[in-house]
Amino acid sequence: MSFKRSTELKTLNNYYNRDDNQIVVLYGDRFSGKMPLLKDFLKGKDFFYYMARACSEDEQLKLWHDELKDELPKDSEIKEGYQGIIAAMMEQPVKDGKRIIVIDEFHNIIKSGNDFMEAVVHGAHNKWSRQPVMFLLCSSSVYWVESQMVDKLKELAFEISGLLRLNDLKFLEFTRHFKNYGLQNSVEAYAVLGGSPMLWELWDDSFSVSDNICRLILREGAPLNDYGKRILPSELREHQVYNTILATLAQGKNKLNDIYKYTGFSRAKISVYMKNLIELEIVAKIDSVNTAGHENVQKGIYRIVNPFTRFWYKYVFRYYSRLAFMSPEKFYAKYIAPTFKSYTAYCFTDVCAEYLDILNQMDKLSFRYNQRGVWVGKVGTIDTVAMDDDGRTLVALCNWENPTMNYADYEWLMFCVKQAKLNVNDVYLFSAGDFDLELKQEDMINDHLTLIDGSQI
């Protein structure tokens, strides 16, 4: 099964179809589906492709020179340096349209100096050829592109025509592809895979969620079993420290003080390593939306961002030695099944927020919000708080684990609203199951209350 990134493909083609030359940066993590998108985009077009390695500049030039020599006609001349390589590609005749030069993992070249980027800019300005060209610079290092690239390139960064990030695909996209799954299976699978299309391609919705977990993650040598062992980037030092922090977060100890007490690491050390994890987008700090109830807010909450990473450290990393003497099925039954329903509740909250975002984009709400977040109190949490510039506010509470959402849940939400000191215009209650009679009666008389059950989602 192939997952098309139609929106991103359209954006790339828009750049390609412009009259002027382009330098476009395309980036996303290693499971973002960058290569399938590239292949779709390059189909039927005239292009050169090079994958940059992490090596010295001299070795890089030799590797690229040798690969290009195999592609070009035998009598072609390739002059020295990056300008020579780019010139050799641009001098080749184009059958139709614009030439595309793709340099994948281009950060491996940029890190050694700006000679490469100067050659790209020189090529885009057509100093030696009238051949129209599009340079597509690709990277799987999201943090480097967003935090370090501009500082490294300096004024050359202004030559970039556009940046296109491959974000995770939404839950709605997941349900469109995995049509054999209902709401429960879809939420559970998404809570394991997240929005990574390369992981989706491994999943088979003709099998149950537990069967997929057993065959893809728990079985020795399975593709996601191998991936789990190398989640952390190789360039990070002291993997043992990072592993310990992630395993601690996965067990629900998500405040710095909790991590300090559990691991014994100093608060200063934890802060340094947490900063690195945040920069790599492995961990996020959850900041409550800004409300008048500042004194009731719980501060310093951390969460593992990627669902697969969270699943791995919650279940597999913690009990990994048991897999040596236990079948995947028995491992799942003993270590995963008892808590899996409660574990996936966070994903249902994200799904409900996505549902609200769709209604918001379609102007199906009483007002259009422009900020949305969570309110984490010292006592209680509001799953979703959405506001507009005029202060109009929507709050939502999500029920995943219980068969029925009760009126007491609504009362608890309103207690949290009071703690947050919010003036609420609309209340949305989401339940994967049903609502009790009292809540349904309240819904009939309260114009500001909306109930959404699993069938509607």
Image: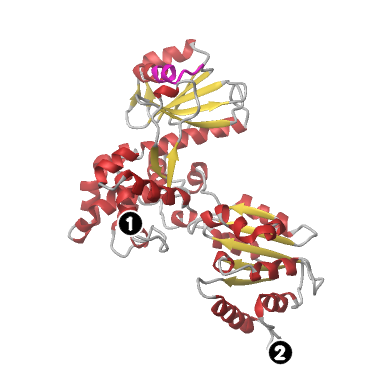
Q: Which residues are magenta?
A: 415-423
The residue positioned farthest toward the left in the image shown: 325
Residue 303 shown left or right of residue 40 in the figure = left
Please name the amino acid that badge 1 sits on.
Answer: Ile
Residue 292 shown left or right of residue 69 in the figure = left
Q: Is residue 418 magenta?
A: yes
Question: Against 19, is 119 above or below?
Answer: below
Q: CA distance from mark 2 to mark 1?
A: 51 Å
* Residue 75 position within the rendered picture, expressed as x and y whole percent measured from the top left: 71, 89
Q: Which residue is mark 1?
A: 217
* Residue 52, quarter of picture: bottom right
Q: Main secondary structure of the magenta part?
A: helix
Front one among 154 and 169: 154
The residue positioned farthest toward the right in the image shown: 130
The numbered disc on residue 233 is none
Q: Earlier in the sequence, mark 2 or mark 1?
A: 2
